Amino acid sequence: MAIVVFMRGINVGGHRRFRPSVLAKELSALEVVNVGAAGTLVVRRPGSRARLRAELVRKLPFEAEVALCDDRDLLQLEKENPFGIEGPHPDIVRFVSILSKAGRCTAAIPFRLPPDGEWFVRVIASKERFVCGVYRRNMKTIGYLGQIDKLFGAPATTRNWNTILAVVQILKRRLIENSISTRSANYGRPNTGG
């Protein structure tokens, strides 16, 4: 099973600058794939979660909130597709916030932020550690995204839905590679089944 790592607050607004691609190379024994510059990693051979988390914390040049997700949870999220078939609009971004632990929302879903007037963030779904929604491209949006932590009672790190889909493609490619490898290893062996 692969584990996906989401680091919070990496390379945002010129602060906490860091190159996740360098970290991926340093962790090459774990078969790490870097996805973008925001601190998203697919760890194909993670070993234990505790050891992976400790290794990440040790290698990061600063303290950071890290959320770890099992591959099957992201594959299921993509399968369920909380955004439906509607395509994105140019000024609207679909997002997934990953909670560091399961949280409970204090507001009825769906909801919008701010609740009155023009909205900047709309939360449309929540399941376990995933909060899904859309936001407007605007400087005020970051402040409203930050309210997700308080509303769900757990630190959240946010990624564009396109990033989640890129992660899922890496996970699916790995599943195909493993399936082919297993079939190749079994090719030519006598069938002992009845």
Image: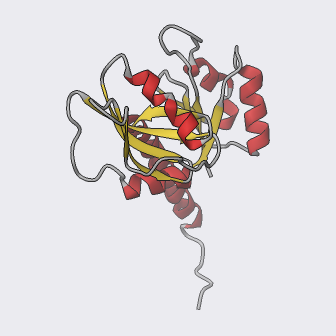
Q: What residue is at 71 percent from the left and 28 percent from the top?
A: 56
Pick the residue in front: 133 or 51.
Answer: 133
**Farthest residue in the bottom direction?**
194
Q: Quadrant of residue 159?
A: top left
* Residue 6, quarter of the rendered image: top right
The answer to whether residue 130 is visible is yes
Count of numbered marks: 0
Left or right side of 88 for 70: right
Task: Give above or below for 162 relative to 139.
Answer: below
Query: Would residue 121 be found to the left or right of residue 68 on screen?
Result: left
Q: Is residue 111 left or right of residue 192?
A: left
Residue 97 at x, y = what percent? 49, 38
Find residue 137 and report its horizontal and vertical position in percent. Answer: 30, 23
Point 67% across, 23% down: residue: 64
Quarter in which the C terminus is drawn: bottom right
* Quarter where residue 123 is shown: top left
